[in-house]
Each structure stands twice: as structure tokens, then as C-alpha cells.
Image (cartoon, grey):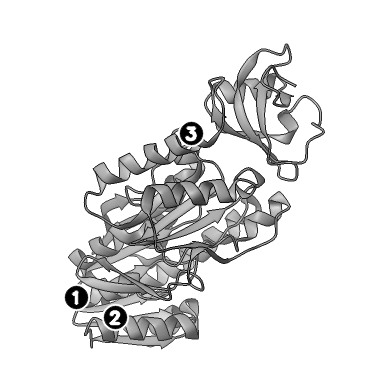
Amino acid sequence: MGPDGLPQVSLIRRGVERWQAGHPWIYRADLNGDPALQGGEVVRVTDARGWFLGKAFYSKHSKISLRWLSYEDVAVDTDFFRQRLALADAMRRRALPGETTYRVVHGEADLLPGLVVDRYGDCLSVQFLIPGTEQRKQLLVDLLVELYKPRAIINRSDVGVRALEGLPQEKGVLYGTQPGPVAYDEGLVRVRADLLEGQKTGAFLDQRENHIMASQYAFGEALDCFSYVGGFALQLATRAQKVTAVEISDQAAAQLRENAASNKLTNVDVVVANAFDFLRDSVDEGRRFDTIVLDPPSFAKNKDAIEGALRGYKEINLRAIQLLRPGGYLISASCTYHIDEQAFEDMLASAAADAKRRVQIIEKRGAGKDHPVLLNLRETRYLKCFVLRVL
């Protein structure tokens, strides 16, 4: 125990070097022994000599044993979390003035490991991903109520990563009453999201700025693959003559049709199909498009899946390049953080070469400003979005 009564965890030299290099995660192999702790504790982190290095959340079951909280010897109490939430809030208010739909807390990138909070107007959707935040759930909910005075707070901790922490999946209403579908604006369109049953925390807020950007390039006949509820398709429809939106989920496709109808966008044709099959068949049929968006789910959950993921990305991008008329635009995204921007760009170059087409890079983009990237934690730079022009 340390002088403040907190348990102490010491690191071997490799762990100390990692900590001092600024990486906020310390792996179990870098601990000096196995702490007799239950998980979820705030611990004092020391080197082998007992010299203080900082404070962290401890996880018993995960390979990531320590998640950085502070270099300073400060109390990790209610005021600590209140200040961290205020720090995150201040950035959003400056970067997104007047906005009411955005990511409030982006985990480690906002110095709050294991916590994700998204705001949809007067409703919040929250994920508690590690024992450290799970055990402080009520405290964090109380602080969010204090800061945002929401109508409801929804728990969307129904994610697979909790299993790595020895935690069950959970979802439900933590505060207020079930709000039902909520509506918010993205550029020229209004989108509805189901915070309790939708994917992630209800919608893909990391792509909001890219959704709006897509309308700038849309023209002619457009194709949106992996459409979900229409984040890209609806934006394309504000400029394109016709949009074909491909989505494999019947439920998401139904919501997409509702979103198109509520925006009076009659030029959206929703096709329930596997995007890989649709792209292959479209090439075989000799179809052509002027604008194509590819925004698939992650193809690699771990490093072992990278090779297969790159094959999948290359297949769909090759087909898309083949389908575009000269001068057409391809907006291609990947949320697989195991594949970095350079690897993704190399894959696109290979696809263009195989398609025997010349391709320009117009923009390289990432997640929106409400999803900051933490230096020294590449996992927070997970989203890649390339705007390409096929000649």
C-alpha cells in the first residue's frame, strides 16, 4: 500500500520505459509480479525501486493491466472526474460551437480511459468499457447529469470488448426514461437514431463531418455500400440524381427508407443485399456510377486478421474503381485501427493498378473533431477516409 492507502503496482524496466514514453496502456507482461487485486482499483504505479510514476486503473482480466490516469500524486475522486469531464466539454464547445450532437468523451483521448459518452441533444448514450469505469458508473452518471442536465442517459455497454475485462454486456436506461428514437441534423438532412437498439451508441458520430463532406462531391448516379441508416446515402441524395443504397440488415434498411422519406428524398433506392455480392454483380452487369461511397464495418478485430481484412478492402475498392465513370469520385473509409493510413493507401494504390485506372487523392480525412487523437496512442487514430477521383 502507498501512503494514501492505495495499492501499489510496480513495473519492470520495459514497462517503465513505455510509461515514460507516454503510452497510456501497460500490459500484464510489463508488471513486476501479479497484483492480488480484484480489478477496477485506482493504483499507484511505481518502478522496481518503489519510486512513484503516477496513477492508473487496474484491470485483472485484460492483457492491458494499467490504464493511465495521472502522472501526479492527486486524489482520484469525484472532483478528479468532474474536472476531466469539464476539460472534455470545453474542447467541444470551442470546436463545435452551438452543436448539440457529438461525442462528449472519447476514452483515453479525453484522459478518461474506459468511458465513451455521446450526446444526442438532450439525451446521452454511454459505454463503460472497463472495471474502473463500471464500478464508478453511478458517480459518472451523476456528474453527467450535473453537467448536461439530460432528459435521459442510456447505457450501451453491450459491446464485446467488455468480455476481455471479465464484464457482461449491458444496456438499458440509467437515468430518466427511454426516449425512443431521437432526431438530429447532419448538414442538409435530419437523421433519426435509436439510442437503445441502434449500432454503437445509436449512430456513427465519428463520420458526421465526412457524411456532410460527401454531399460536396456527389453528382450523377451514386452508390452507397454498407449504408446502415443512410449517413452517407442521405447526403449524396441532396446533390446526386439517383442514389442506390446497399444495406444487408432489413431493420437498418427500413430505418434508411424512413429517413429518406422524412427528408423528402425520393431519389434513394434501398437495396437489401451483401455489398460484396452487389459490387461484383454490378461489375459483371456493366453498370456505371459517378459517385461511390464505401464505409464498411471493421474487417479486423485483431492483428491476426489484418491480411484477410486487406484482401476484403481491396476487393470492394477494386470493384468500386471499376464501376466509376471517368471523373467519378470514390469516398472510401476504414474504421479498422489495425490497418494504418499508409497500409490503407497502399491497398488503394494496388486496387487502382489492378483496375488499370489512374486515381487522384483529393482529401485524406479521419474522425470528426469530437473524436480527438491522443498522441502516443495510435488506436485513437482508427478512422481513415479517402476522397479519390478516378480518371
Give the residue pinned by disc 3: 79
Tell me the quadrant of the picture where the N terminus can be found.
top right
Q: Is mark 1 on a helix, strand or loop?
A: loop
Give the residue pinned by disc 1: 238
* Residue 122 in view in this figure: yes
Examine the image and state in which quarter residue 283 appears.
bottom left
Question: How far apart in space, not on screen, are marks 3 and 1 (Cα)?
Answer: 46 Å
For badge 2, the amino acid type reads Arg
Give the vertical position of 132 relative to 333 (above or below).
above
Tags 3 and 1 touching, CB below 8 Å: no
Tags 1 and 2 touching, CB below 8 Å: no
Task: Please state if 53 lies on the left or on the right of 275 as rendered.
Answer: right
Closer to the camera in the image, 97 or 242: 97
Closer to the camera in the image, 13 or 199: 199
Give the residue pinned by disc 2: 288
| Residue drawn at point x = 29 percent, y = 57 percent | 100
Examine the image and state in which quarter residue 16 appears.
top right
The mark closer to the camera, 3 or 1, is 3
**Residue count near mark 3 (Cα–Cα under 10 Å), binned few <14, some 14–19, many ≥20:** few
| Residue drawn at point x = 32 percent, y = 51 percent | 365
Name which of mark 3 and mark 1 comes first in the sequence: 3
Question: How far apart in space, not on screen, are marks 2 and 3 (Cα)?
Answer: 58 Å
